[in-house]
Amino acid sequence: MKPKKKKEDQLIQVEKVLTKEQLNTVFKIREDVFVIEQEVDPSEEYDEFESTSTHFLAKIGEQPAGTARWRFTDKGVKLERFAVLKDMRGAGVGYALVQAVISDIAASPEAKGKKLYLHAQLDAMPLYSKFGFSKVGPMFEECNIQHFKMELYL
């Protein structure tokens, strides 16, 4: 019997969400992380931007591991809803998601010269800093969780 690969040794794949099945998986990850684990009210988690955002699904091997989305706003390009399942953390999924989202935005001609921004939970700030995001303004609360706004110009 072959020893099972540890999640840290498996390839992380990030794919743009193109099917209803993928989107359902994204929503399940967000429910597990935000609604159940972080106790975010479902009415705050799911919004009117679901259909106009570009969603991503990360997998380790064949296992769903994380998600994120981005969308245009009147302030620039907002990156949001980064979530990694608890038992998949520490394997580089968050890093792979940020990298994939930024690459996708950079490939979008409409995003050229626009500010990228996000609302970062405190423990995620070091990850976003690795990509050049900088903290802007005071700490604020969103869904009973402390955040800082972070920005990046491509």
Image: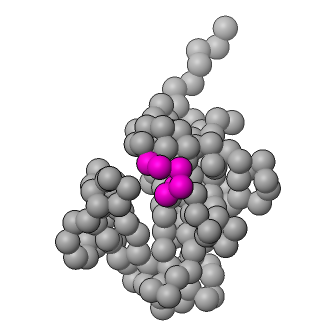
**Magenta span of residues:** 40-45
The residue lying at 48 percent from left, 64 percent from top is 80
**Residue 49 appears left or right of 34:** right
Residue 136: % across, % down: 25, 76
Name the side, left or right, on which 95 lies relative to 126: right
Please say whether residue 133 is visible from this viewpoint. yes
Residue 145 colored in magenta in the image: no
Q: Residue furthest top?
A: 1
Determine if residue 13 is in view: no
Give coordinates of residue 36: x percent, y percent: 48, 37
Rendered position, 18 above or below 42 = below
Q: Quadrant of the C terminus?
A: bottom left
Where residue 95 sits, quadrant-wise, is bottom left
Given residues 52 and 18, the one toward you in this image is 52
User: Which quarter of the figure has residue 19?
Assistant: bottom right
Name the residue at 67% across, 56% down: 15
Dominant SS type (magenta) = helix
Q: Nearer the viewer, residue 26 or 50?
A: 50
Image point (28%, 73%), residue name = 134
